[in-house]
Each structure stands twice: as C-alpha cells, then as structure tokens.
C-alpha cells in the first residue's frame, strides 16, 4: 500500500534531481498534499562570502539543480507563510491541521530552510536530504570541505527531521565520488546519486529500519573569501596533475596467480613476490579482468590490443600460461564472467561499448542469447549469481558504474529480468562496482567490490551479503584487499579448492604516447 505523502516546497518549484527522485519513488508514495511556503528567504553576507556565492553560480547551480514548477494535477495545495525566529522557520497551525485532516503518513521536505517543529502537535515523519556524511560533515556547503580536506567521497543521507540539526533518524545513506579537480562534477555526482535514495528511504521507513550511524560530525559554515581562494588554487593544481597524468602516464595492468592466504574478513595485503605472472603477448598492451573457467582448467581475461585500442577476450591454460588463444575480438570486450546452468558453462562478456548484454555458451561462442528485459540498457561488469531457483544479475550502467550497483532478477538466465525492489542495492564508489564472481565461503556469501573512490581499481572491498531474496538485499563490508607494491586488485577469483587466487593489478608508468593511445582508444570505441 502506498504511503500518503505531503510535499514541502518553496513557491511551487523544485529542482530537477528532486523531481526525478519523486518519479523513482512514485510506486511507494501518493502525494496528496503540497505545502507551499511563500516567504523562505536565505540571508546572504556578500562581504564575507562573496567568492563563495560567485563559485556557487558555476558549480552548485547546474543542470540537476535547475528549478521548475511542480505538476500538481488534482493535488490540494496549502499556501502559507512560515514563522521566523532567527534563522529558524516553523509551520503555522493551519499546516499541522491540514496534515492531520489528510492523514498524511510523511512529509518530503524539498523547501524551507532550518525547520523547527512544534512538539505539541501531531507530526508525521518529515524526510529531508542532507549532502554530507553526518559523522564527519554537518552544515554546508555540500562537497566543498570534502574537496578541501582531500576526501575521496562525500556522504548523502535521507533523515527524519528533529529539532536538533542533522540528528534525526537516518533512513537511507549513500556515498558519492569526490572529483578533486572539479567542484561542479562533484556536485553533479552527489545530486545524481541522491535520486534513488528517496525510494530506499520509503522502504526503510515503512519497515521501521533506520540506519545506525554517527551524527556528531563537525558543523561547517559557508567558507570565507580566503578559504575559497585556497579551494580554487587546490582545484587548479589537481587539474594540472590530471592533465599531466593523462598525457604521459598510463596504467600497466598485469595478471597473476598466487597461493591463497586470505581470510576474507579483515584488511589484508597480498605479497607480490609470490605472484606468478601471466605472460603478455606482444600485440597486447595489458591483461586485466581475469576469471577462472568453471572447470578451473582455463583463465579468461581482457587483453587490450596495442593497434586498435580495443579489448579481446583470450583464454589461457592454467597449467601452461604460454598457451593462449583468442575467443572474442573485433569490438571492445572485457570482464568475461562465467556461470554454470543446466550442466553447461556460459559467459557474460562486457559489451557495453557496442551492444546490449548477451550471454554465450563457452563452447559455442558464435551463438548470442540477449538478456530479456535489458535489451535497451548498456550494462557493465555483469555478474550472475544463481540462488534458490532465481538468477540474480549484478551490474553497473555505463555512466554510473563506478558508484551505483544494480540488481535485477529472473527465474533463469534465459528468463525476463526485472529490477529488484531494493534497486540500486549499493551507491558508493568504494564498493559498488563488481570485481569478480560472488562466492560461498565458510558459510558466508561474499561479493567483491572495486574501490574506485580514489584511483580506478586501487584496491578491493570484501562484502558479506547477509540477505538476498526476491524482496530483500543487505550487505556489510567485512574486509579489504590490497597489494604491497602495486595498485589493485581490480578483479579477483579463486580456484575450486580455494587454494589459489587469480588477480589483476597495475602500476602507473611513464609513456610519451600515453595521451595518443587514450585518444585513439576513445575514437575506436565510438
């Protein structure tokens, strides 16, 4: 049954990201009332914060924060003027009366500023977004101090308001990547990652399952002009570093096997001195995305062609790494994840650059079976997990794969896939992107997530899936994996005895032609 919701806005306008959040949540809520505040006013100190307001015009004001009128249709509108006491606003009595008369289950706050509630009134939960991890960053502006303090990510919460700043029950939490050379890109990241959170908050509010996390972070205020100057200098220097890296450095990926000494329940470091590297053929720039075949006799991986800049899928014998053959070529292929179904092995190669996702039988690679229900999507790092007669497909989408993990379900790999009700199941650059098959180990179901919060594929997070069904999904981070002298792993696999691991990793290498190769690869993929 849908929740009866009231929408709190200013001057009957909301931002584009807020509108999209409502659209995503429309199956969970029925907006029966609009509370339209007509006197919200944010006082500005132009002398102390002039540079910040100038910066704001080019960053926080963007395509996702552009405001537009609400489509009201038949919804009742209550126009009111708030009561000001200092910086705090409060509702007049007619607002409380309207909420009571309409039997509103919750209020979605997209308007007004600091809101103080009359605790003598009957008040439904008031859900509000805050961009920042409240255990570290309270107050405002969103994302600014995270960049200044060289954080790799910023938090996003949906909380139920109380009369204490940023201290209500939290019903949804996500993380967004900080782009250290661009405040605008950082802002676009956290606004776009906010869109699915309202629906997730609805589910947790209905189930009365708030998220437990600290809310005692520092309360930040608008930055002074001097602080904004320091901020702009930092952005400039980070931008110069990025351009220099793009022109003259590139990641040199390798693949290796190693004895498995991992516990998979703590922070662990692999020792590269025991790695057995897979030799890279001359025609290829690097090897990455390795997977064991289901019988363990082969390794399948992405091999980047030096000439075309595209990825081939090649197969390598585990007993003799020099025996290698090409499976897929001609377009860009990567992440050749495999699974068994009805006694036959299938591959799910990533083909997002040129096709909707399909699977192929390992022994009949010319026959394609497109995933039903996903024909219009370009998906990344598709990983299939079979459980209790259901096929669970984990994947990212091209624009958001580093941060957002989706989960879709079907009755079989050849059935019609539909989104899981908790979709997206993860929003975080440090754990979202898939980094290998899901495994069952010592009574635990484990998912491996790439840590892309800093550099791409810089390490691995180990997630324990604690609930996986047609209705539920929950996971918790229980470990991390890194490598002593390299970045990675970016993908990880285990042989059937769990005695050996298969990983990829990289180091940053100087090359006069790095920029040329990047441009060439992008042109080829287009």
Image (spheres, helix red, strand yellow):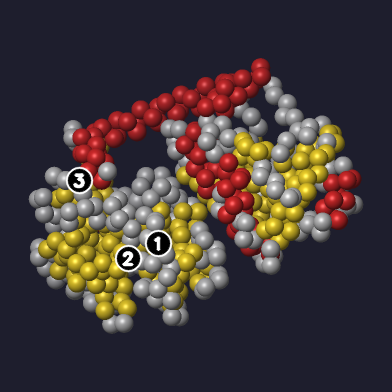
Q: Residue 462 got which mark?
A: none
Q: Nearer the viewer, residue 383 or 295?
A: 383
Q: For residue 293, say whether it is visible.
A: no
Q: For residue 282, say whether it is visible.
A: yes
Find numbered disc 3 in the image and state the secondary structure of the residue it sits on. Answer: loop
Residue at position x 26%, y 57% in the image: 334
Residue 135 against residue 293 in the figure, above or below: above
Question: In the image, 463: left or right of 282?
Answer: right
Tell me which label, 3 or 1, sits earlier in the chain: 3
| Mark whose residue sits in front, 3 or 1 | 1
Question: Would you call the spot at circle 1 few (<14 residues within 10 Å), some (14-19), or many (20 or more)?
Answer: some
Quadrant in the rendering for residue 25 = bottom right
Q: Nearer the viewer, residue 201 or 513?
A: 201
Find numbered disc 1 in the image and state the secondary structure of the residue it sits on. Answer: loop
* Residue 411 on image: x %, y %: 43, 76
Query: Which quadrant of the figure contains the N terminus?
Result: bottom right
Please give the residue where the numbered disc 1 appears in the rendered image.
Answer: 374
Measured Cα–Cα span from mark 3 to mark 1: 27 Å
Please give the residue where the numbered disc 2 appears in the rendered image.
Answer: 370
Please give the residue where the numbered disc 3 appears in the rendered image.
Answer: 309
Question: In the image, 3: left or right of 121?
Answer: left
* Residue 17 on image: x %, y %: 57, 43
Q: Nearer the viewer, residue 107 or 187?
A: 107
* Residue 50 on image: x %, y %: 61, 20
Find numbered disc 2 in the image and state the secondary structure of the residue it sits on. Answer: strand
Question: Cβ–Cβ below 8 Å for labels 2 and 1?
Answer: yes
């Amino acid at each position: 049954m849908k929740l009866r919701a009231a929408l709190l806005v200013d001057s009957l306008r909301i931002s584009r990201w807020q509108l999209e959040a409502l659209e995503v949540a429309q199956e969970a809520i029925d907006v029966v009332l609009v509370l339209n505040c007509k006197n919200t006013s944010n006082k500005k100190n132009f002398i102390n914060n002039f540079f910040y307001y100038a910066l704001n015009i080019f960053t926080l004001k963007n395509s996702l924060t552009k405001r537009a009128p609400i489509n009201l249709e038949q919804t009742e509108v209550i126009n009111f003027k708030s009561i000001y006491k200092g910086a705090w606003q409060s509702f007049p009595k007619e607002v409380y009366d309207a909420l009571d008369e309409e039997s509103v289950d919750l209020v979605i706050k997209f308007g007004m500023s600091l809101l103080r509630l009359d605790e003598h009134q009957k008040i439904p939960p008031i859900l509000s977004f805050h961009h920042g991890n409240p255990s570290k960053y309270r107050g405002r502006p969103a994302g600014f101090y995270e960049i200044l303090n060289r954080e790799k990510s910023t938090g996003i919460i949906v909380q139920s308001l109380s009369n204490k700043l940023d201290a209500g029950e939290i019903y949804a939490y996500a993380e967004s990547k900080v782009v250290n050379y661009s405040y605008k890109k950082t802002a676009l990241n956290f606004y776009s990652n906010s869109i699915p959170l309202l629906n997730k908050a609805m589910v947790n509010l209905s189930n009365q399952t708030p998220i437990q996390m600290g809310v005692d972070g520092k309360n930040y205020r608008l930055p002074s002009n001097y602080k904004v100057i320091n901020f702009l200098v930092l952005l400039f220097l980070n931008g110069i570093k990025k351009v220099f890296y793009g022109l003259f450095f590139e990641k040199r990926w390798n693949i290796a096997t190693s004895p498995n000494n991992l516990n998979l329940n703590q922070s662990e470091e692999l020792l590269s001195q025991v790695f057995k590297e897979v030799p890279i053929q001359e025609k290829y720039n690097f090897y990455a995305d390795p997977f064991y075949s289901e019988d363990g006799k082969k390794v399948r991986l992405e091999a980047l062609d030096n000439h075309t800049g595209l990825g081939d899928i090649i197969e390598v014998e585990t007993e003799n790494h020099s025996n290698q053959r090409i499976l897929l070529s001609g377009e860009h292929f990567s992440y050749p994840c495999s699974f068994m179904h009805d006694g036959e092995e299938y591959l799910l190669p990533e083909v997002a650059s040129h096709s909707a996702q399909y699977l192929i039988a390992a022994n009949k690679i010319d026959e394609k079976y497109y995933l039903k229900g996903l024909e219009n999507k370009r998906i990344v790092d598709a990983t299939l997990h079979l459980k209790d007669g259901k096929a669970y497909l984990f994947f990212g989408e091209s624009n958001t794969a580093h941060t957002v993990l989706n989960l879709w379900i079907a009755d079989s790999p050849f059935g019609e896939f539909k989104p899981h009700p908790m979709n997206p199941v993860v929003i975080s650059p440090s754990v979202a992107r898939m980094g290998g098959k899901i495994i069952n180990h010592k009574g635990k179901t484990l998912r491996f997530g790439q840590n892309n919060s800093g550099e791409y594929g810089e390490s691995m997070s180990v997630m324990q899936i604690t609930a996986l069904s047609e209705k539920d999904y929950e996971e918790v981070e229980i470990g991390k994996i890194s490598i002593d002298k390299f970045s990675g792993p970016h993908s990880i696999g285990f042989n059937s005895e769990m005695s050996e691991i298969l990983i990829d990793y990289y180091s940053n290498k100087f090359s006069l032609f790095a920029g040329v190769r990047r441009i060439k690869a992008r042109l080829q993929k287009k």
